[in-house]
Image (cartoon, rainbow, N blue to C red):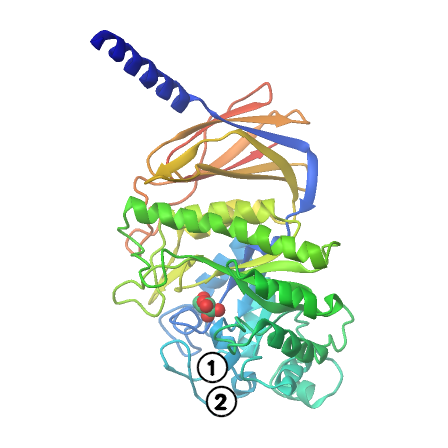
């Protein structure tokens, strides 16, 4: 009897072991190209919040300690250039619906001061305004995405802003722009018509906002360049599908290019947990929340498909990322960025790629010193976070064609009776024929062997980069800025078009094949 149960236990154990050792199987059909992965999925977001703009991006024109161009840190300009940022959203967030843009132009000494209503009620001197932001975008080589004030601004204000930045005709606004030093228009194409209109943007109902949107959008024209504006309506948060239903039903589709969607990977709004020193349960929950973006995108897309089967209106996830408790002693919403954030970034971008048909833009919240930042600063020091590195490793997917991918043998990460997939993957082919495969192993402890079966084309060479670290809450710091950086993967073998790889726990890998 004892012997039998021993043998049975041994058999079960052997079976578990051999199951655990079975590699995950991913089939990449390199000849099945789907829609383009719009580069605008890689957008960023800069709000007047904490130290994102003031004492972050912008350190002032008279700063003698930090290298800057017209007050904007040169190290940040360079880092964002290297990242290939396609668009930058500004000035909010909630701040946008309280922002009076006319107070942020003209001689700086004459600009009125303002109280930042939403974020700490601190006094801002309006020294970073429209010119400063749009000039910054030119320096980085990114498209500006202006979030317009609908909650407390007038239709006239918005009409004037569009005129001011885009027109060539000698209107009052254009003459003012020219007086303040800018002859040519900036031709801003991307416009958000309000932000979170269901909340900080005015606490409106969906039907009411739909009408307000129609009114504001009517008076936004491209003025002169003929290319048309890309108008984005304030969208739902998470799974608030009724909001999307109302907007898709009530707003004529020739008046709207995209609907926004916001989703934060937060444990709970009352207890967000620490940015560093979190438990495995907290890590798991964050991953679980990050995965939900897939469900939300699919849910909103189903409604959009009903009203817009031809897929003309895009879904723009213009706020996403991890949200934890603000670090002790940190400015508003300042949080450290660890390998957990790298996991959120890698799997969220894979989800955006795999939903490229409807998702045509997104903005990580936020670019510097706020929430899931790609850059953190402290006086003259600046560091690039693990999230920065993932976004840099992945940016080769920008504007490439999504490839058909099949995970035929998946494994799960299970904790306390809940499970999520272990592995997240997406693949694309760029205009030169290079295939990129990005893979995330988000398991807390387990490394994962993966067989990638490449079909449709013969590949002879592969390079790769890996981002990982010894501990999941490892991070870069002002004392050790390069603790976590991507490393080249050596000796990648392709045999019979089969790529055999092994990913350590909490790691992100990008493979490039020719
Ligand atoms: O990104 C921080 C805030 O989160 C934004 O201001 C708001 O739009 C959202 O609720």
* Nearer the observer, 458 or 77: 458
Q: Horizontal and vertical percent for residue 396?
A: 58, 45
Horizontally, residue 216 falls left or right of residue 319, namely right
Horizontally, residue 339 falls left or right of residue 126, namely left
Residue at the image position 65 percent from the left and 45 percent from the top: 400
Residue at the image position 69 percent from the left and 70 percent from the top: 250
Please give the residue where the numbered disc 2 appears in the rendered image: 111
Q: Tag 2's secondary structure?
A: loop
* Nearer the observer, 2 or 256: 2
- CB atoms at circles 2 and 1 under 8 Å apart? yes
Q: Residue furthest right?
A: 226
Mark 1: is the Cβ under 8 angstroms from ligand 1?
A: no
Q: Horizontal and vertical percent for residue 33?
A: 69, 38
Dividing the picture into quadrants, the one containing residue 3 is top left
Horizontally, residue 216 falls left or right of residue 195, namely right
* Crowding near the residue tagged with mark 2, few <14, some 14–19, many ≥20 C-alpha atoms within 10 Å: some
Dividing the picture into quadrants, the one containing residue 161 is bottom right
Q: Horizontal and vertical percent for residue 282?
A: 32, 49
Please give the residue where the numbered disc 1 appears in the rendered image: 127
Against 421, residue 226 (above or below) is below
Against 18, residue 136 (above or below) is below
């Amino acid at each position: 009897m004892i012997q039998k149960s021993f043998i049975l236990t041994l058999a079960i154990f052997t079976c578990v072991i051999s199951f655990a050792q079975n590699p995950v199987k991913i089939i990449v059909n390199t000849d099945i190209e789907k829609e383009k992965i719009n580069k605008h999925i890689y957008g960023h977001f800069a709000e007047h919040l904490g130290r994102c703009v003031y004492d972050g991006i912008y350190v002032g024109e008279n700063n003698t300690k930090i290298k800057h161009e017209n007050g904007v840190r040169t190290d940040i300009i360079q880092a964002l250039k290297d990242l290939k940022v396609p668009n930058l959203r500004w000035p909010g967030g909630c701040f946008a619906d309280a922002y009076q843009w006319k107070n942020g132009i003209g001689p700086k000494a004459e600009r009125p001061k303002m109280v930042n209503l939403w974020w700490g009620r601190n006094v801002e001197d309006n020294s970073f305004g429209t010119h400063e932001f749009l000039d910054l975008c030119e320096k980085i080589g990114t498209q500006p995405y202006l979030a317009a004030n609908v909650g407390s601004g007038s239709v006239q204000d918005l009409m004037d802003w569009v005129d001011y930045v885009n027109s060539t005709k000698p209107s009052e606004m254009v003459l003012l722009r020219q007086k303040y030093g800018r002859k040519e228009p900036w031709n801003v194409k991307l416009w958000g018509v309000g932000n979170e209109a269901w909340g900080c943007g005015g606490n409106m109902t969906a039907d009411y906002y739909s009408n307000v949107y129609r009114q504001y959008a009517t008076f936004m024209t491209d003025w002169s360049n003929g290319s048309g504006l890309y108008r984005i309506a304030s969208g739902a948060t998470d799974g608030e599908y009724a909001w999307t239903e109302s907007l898709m039903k009530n707003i004529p589709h020739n008046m709207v290019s995209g609907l926004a969607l916001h989703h934060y990977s937060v444990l709970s709004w009352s207890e967000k947990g620490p940015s560093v020193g979190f438990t495995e349960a907290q890590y798991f929950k964050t991953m679980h929340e990050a995965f939900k973006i897939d469900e939300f995108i699919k849910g909103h897309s189903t409604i959009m498909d009903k009203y817009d089967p031809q897929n003309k209106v895009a879904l723009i996830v213009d706020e996403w990322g991890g949200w934890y408790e603000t670090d002790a002693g940190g400015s508003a919403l300042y949080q450290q960025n660890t390998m957990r954030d790298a996991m959120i970034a890698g799997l969220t971008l894979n989800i955006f790629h795999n939903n490229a048909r409807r998702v045509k833009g997104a903005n990580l919240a936020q670019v510097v010193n706020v929430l899931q930042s790609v850059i953190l600063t402290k006086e003259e020091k600046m560091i690039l976070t693990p999230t920065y590195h993932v976004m840099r490793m992945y940016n080769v997917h920008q504007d490439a064609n999504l490839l058909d991918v099949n995970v035929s043998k998946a494994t799960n990460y299970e904790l306390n009776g809940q499970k999520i997939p272990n592995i997240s993957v997406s693949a694309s082919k760029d205009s030169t024929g290079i295939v990129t495969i990005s893979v995330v192993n988000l398991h807390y402890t387990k490394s994962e062997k993966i067989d990638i079966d490449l079909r449709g084309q013969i590949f002879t060479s592969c390079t790769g980069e890996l981002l990982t670290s010894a501990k999941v809450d490892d991070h870069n710091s002002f004392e050790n800025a390069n603790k976590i950086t991507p490393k080249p993967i050596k000796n990648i073998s392709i045999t019979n078009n089969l790529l055999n790889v092994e990913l350590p726990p909490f790691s992100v890998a990008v493979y490039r094949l020719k």
